[in-house]
Amino acid sequence: MKPSIKKNPVDSIFAALTAVSSFAIIFLIIGILIVLVSESSLAIHKFGILNFITETDWDPVKEIFGAASTLYGTMVTTALSMLIAIPIAIGIAVFITEIAPNFLKGPIGIAIELLAAIPSIIYGMWGLFTLAPLMTDYIEPALQQTLGKLPFFSVLLAGTPMGIDLLTASVILSIMIIPFTASISRDAFNLTPEVVKESAYALGATQWEVVKNIVIPYSKLGVFGGVVLSMGRAIGETMAVAFVLGNNHQITSSLLDAAATITVSLANEFSEADTDIYLSSLFYLALVLFVLSFITLFIAKYFLIRAERKYSR
Amino acid sequence: MTHETKRRIEGFIALLLSTMAAFVGLFWLVFILGDVLVHGIGAMHVSLFTNDPAPAGVEGGGLRNAFLGHLIITGFATLIGVPIGVLGGTFLAEYARGRWISRVISILADIMVSVPSIIVGTFIYALMVRPVGHFSGWAGAAALAIIMIPVVLRTTEDMLSLVPWTLREAAFALGSPYYKVIIQVVYRGAATGIFTGILLSIARVAGETAPLLFTAFNNSFFSYNMNGPMPSLTVSVFQYAMGPYDDWHAQAWAASLVITLFILFITITGRLLIKWRYKQ
């Protein structure tokens, strides 16, 4: 029970101070929304909402701005990085919870989480100077020689490998988001009651069948939350991608072409925007990014909360 | 081939793939850290810490100004962000404990932790850079503080919730007002946890680049002036890496190594502290 003697004036002041500090979060979110909307009002009036999202041109000279090319870049890199990262992340979670001997569980978990602690600028450096040349010289030509011969992939892998492209950016992004899915999935797997698993073993299930039919179905809410969270991260990642994407506003069918994402064009163009409409359009892009990532993160949080409720019962 | 052998083979393959996934994860970690280590050590030189940047293309410059700028910006961000974060977390875990508003703010803070940091950069640009017409160290510190607040707030809330309620009741029974209970009993009980949260939030913002790009911007001179553009290690690394000179690239690697070691050191220290405090 809380004390009923709350009349102490110092206590009231302290309570008010803490309240204001925590409401700072709400003020921040509303403030960011208001500022971004008002700064981009010029562009919103000129280009509208649907038009801006579907317009493929981004031309500072003619002052025509559309988000389609950057949105496309954001979506492709996000989708491709998740395609690479999710199987690996879930594999890691299975390894840590089911396969690894006890003395390895902690250290491997920490090692994977260290991947999340490395700053994105380091990923960018490494991507530009180490990964991009490897992609150009070995991986991309090899992919073209093998997968590139197949009908659909021949379009995806067309062009000269340059290393500065959607594929390299997606590989880097995938490494960055592995820890988020992996650690949340691991925690969710760990919450599967031992009794349920043991009953399955008693019925003669193999270890993999227990994982596949008991652990994963039981923890799917948590795993899904982790996957959506890493999607939110991928959408908003800036520096790691800025190094290796080339900031080229174009919609390209080949993954071996330079492109731009919302974050990359913001990072490259924001301090160089010389006209009001240019800057306003960049703020508009930031607004689109804010809304997009906020909704994604909210969905992730929703699943994680539902998972939490389910397990705490 | 019986049904059972098929099941065993399928299981073996799946578990083998999982094990390989773990090695892929470790491989990336070792690859990236090893690469930064090798390039960074090769490029490390005393002049990096003692010299300011030389004019473009001239060899022998350093990043002394960026080290200083980075320390100042991160320091002020910590001074602004930590008190707000700790007090905010206190409200959620103490005065508003169990209320719906506490739950809502906690969820929103969790979302803010993952909101793209470049958005915060554009926000501060509109608030603090455009009105005055120039970039400033203050704007950079404010942007980093905003990123710090939700991190500190959430860990503080969690750590305070771990302090048993009966401990507070014992203090109430002695007649002390709530604020005294919080400061003298609850904060003390949760000190290690809160400190770790602060450490991890510093590690988080110390590597940030995106929010500094158009708030603190950059500056190739030694400067204490928070009211003007201020250099930072991360922005310097970005500019140098994208620049055309080998000497710049070498300095960018060396600076990357310093940033990485600093952040990994803080992160691991934080984890060990938590383990030491809460595992018994």
Image (cartoon, helix red, strand yellow):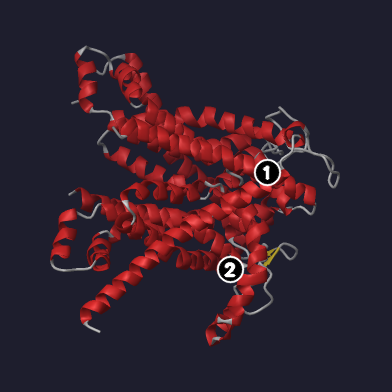
Q: Is residue A22 visible to us here?
A: no
- Image x and y of residue A270, in percent: 67, 51
Secondary structure of residue under mark 1: helix
> Which residue is rendered at x = 34% and y = 69% of the image?
B14
- Image x and y of residue B129, in percent: 66, 39
Tell me the subunit letter for badge 2: A
Q: Please tell me which residue lies in front, A169 or B226.
A: A169
Amino acid type of the residue tagged 1 in the rendering: Ile
- Image x and y of residue B229, in percent: 71, 36
**Left or right placement of residue B234 versus residue A214 in this view:** right
**Left or right placement of residue A161 versus residue A75 in this view:** right
> Which residue is rendered at x = 39% and y = 59% of the image?
A92
> Which residue is rendered at x = 36% and y = 32% of the image?
B276
Tell me the subunit letter for badge 1: B
Q: Residues within 10 Å of mark 2 (few under 14, many from 20)?
A: many
Q: Is residue B120 visible to us here?
A: yes
**Left or right placement of residue A209 versus residue A125 in this view:** left
Q: Please tell me which residue lies in front, A264 or A291.
A: A264
Cα separation, mark 1 vs mark 2, equals 30 Å
Amino acid type of the residue tagged 2 in the rendering: Leu
> Which residue is rendered at x = 43% and y = 62% of the image?
B21
Q: Which residue is mark 2?
A: A167
Q: Please tell me which residue lies in front, A169 or A274.
A: A169
Q: From this view, report whether residue A286 is shown above or below residue B89.
A: below
Q: Which residue is mark 1?
A: B41
Q: From this view, report whether residue B249 is shown above or below residue A68.
A: above
